[in-house]
Image (tube, rainbow, N blue to C red):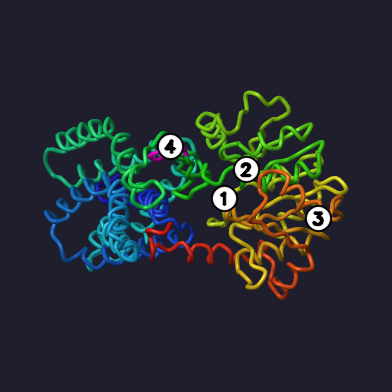
Amino acid sequence: MRKEHLLLFLSGVNSLIIQFVMMREFSIALFCTELIILLISVSYFLGLVVGYFISNRIGKSLIIALALFTFLLHLHITFLVRYAVGFLAKENLGRFAIPLLFLTGTFFISSFYSIFLPKFISEKNPDALPFYYRIEILGSVAGLLLILTLGQINFLAVFFIYFILLGGIISLLFEKKRLLLPCTLGIFLVIFSFYFHALDKRSCEYFYSNFYSWFKGKAQVLFSGYSPYQKIEVLSDSEANKSLYLNGLEYFNPSDLEAFNFFLSELPARLKQPSSVLIVGSGSMSSVYHISPFAKEITTVEIDRKVYEVGRKYFKEYNHLDEIGNWHLVIDDAKHYLKNTGKKFDLVVVDIPAPYYIQTALLFTKEFYAMVKDRLNPGGLISIYLCEKFSPKKKKFLSSRIVAAIDSVFNDFFIVNSHAAGYSFLMATDKFSFSKDKLADTIKLYRFEEGFLVFDKKQARAVVAGTEPASFSNLDIVLDLNLWALPYDIKSK
């Protein structure tokens, strides 16, 4: 294989890998996910345009300098992104975060890798374009396969393979000392690997300390790691309170945990006294503890085993799993599990993050709620939270779409607004075995005497009338939530 063929192939591999890395890191740092992925994709292709434009305008020595700069920049870019967004948050300049990182992505993510194709296709050899382009495409396919295989097992391994291949590209650019250069870069990479986790920890702590005001500038990382699905982080604040973040989004915070778990899990379990319960999602695993005194059997279905392992290890004081004997775990996608299990349940609790992602949003749709209904015993309940406060006076896009989805599947439902938890919660069934008054009395009996409102189906329908349900074919709730999360007022997050 000729040198230019190998350069094009390796460029195709690395170009796709770095796009994958940046999509993950930028979306974590900017608190909104699908929208940032879209922006990074646009930035990636603009970078290709920049590379094509400058390719025949720069000489070999400048390409080598750009290659070395790319190596050093990309080696630190995951940390630099966190420091940049953290600094902007600290200075209350969050509105500049997206433009800054968008421009960074445009010029430094993919532009270097698009230099080679135009360079090799000159006016003297125009017929080589299809062949050379196929080589680059084959490299991209190889990069995709690497991400889908090894990337699902060990994200960091893919990240380091990227730099090994980049070192190979730099080596091919040198006519002389080809062995000396990769050895030097390899030694540098090995030394860097020893400091990677320390840099990862420090940059995460800086980011969270400044991005989220409740850490009061003293976030401490207790755990940081990647699963095939997301980045998982456990942090501690200045008072040693632990919280869980998935891809930079808060999933567990002890400040409102007691009220949240009461309304989502314990309240429906107290009212129903179920024989069998299914919990969709895990996180801190604390829902299991709140349901266990009232149920004979509990099943948790969780797609990400790493989230379960982290939750079980770091949140023992909240989940008490070692003390619970009527519970077991199933690692599976919730939709797949509901479609294929032969079990039926008296209560299904959906304890998942808000729909910032399309995959999560699918569990807030009428189709998913229909799957749940098929797995409920007669009179069985589903319990969900609405990701915000439901307003009886003003229609809210996100909660109204979720309520409309529930209303399209179940005959009856109650909504509870909780001041203590900061959210609204919904229980739905085809026929309740308890009244609205019984629901309110149960809430009053267990420490939440004030700060809640209960709405029945008739009252809720008056608010959401004419609202299109969230569905597989219409997931506008993702866009709405992502737009809300844009870091214009980043200090308020």
The residue located at (82%, 41%) in the rendering is 344
Left or right: 379 as drawn, with respect to 334: right
Q: 390 or 475, which is in the foreground?
A: 390
- Among the two numbered marks 1 and 4 on one chain, the one whose residue lies closer to the N terminus: 4
Q: Main secondary structure of the magenta part?
A: loop
Quarter of the image containing the C terminus?
A: bottom left
- Among the two numbered marks 1 and 2 on one chain, the one whose residue lies closer to the N terminus: 2
Residue 471, numbered circle: none
Q: CA distance from mark 1 to mark 3?
A: 30 Å
Q: CA distance from mark 4 to mark 2?
A: 19 Å
Residue to which mark 1 is pinned: 353
Q: CA distance from mark 2 to mark 3?
A: 30 Å
In the image, residue 132 lies at what x, y percent? Answer: 33, 57
Is residue 319 visible in the rendered structure shown here?
Answer: yes
Q: 264 or 226, which is in the foreground?
A: 264
Range covered by the magenta-colored residues: 236-242
Residue to which mark 3 is pinned: 437
Q: 91 or 479, which is in the foreground?
A: 91
Residue to which mark 4 is pinned: 225
- Residue flagged by tag 2: what amino acid is it? Gly
Is residue 48 visible in the rendered structure shown here?
Answer: no
Q: Residue furthest bottom?
A: 466
Q: Is the C-beta separation of discs 1 and 2 under 8 Å?
A: yes
Q: Considering only vertical position in the picture, is 198 above or below 354?
A: above
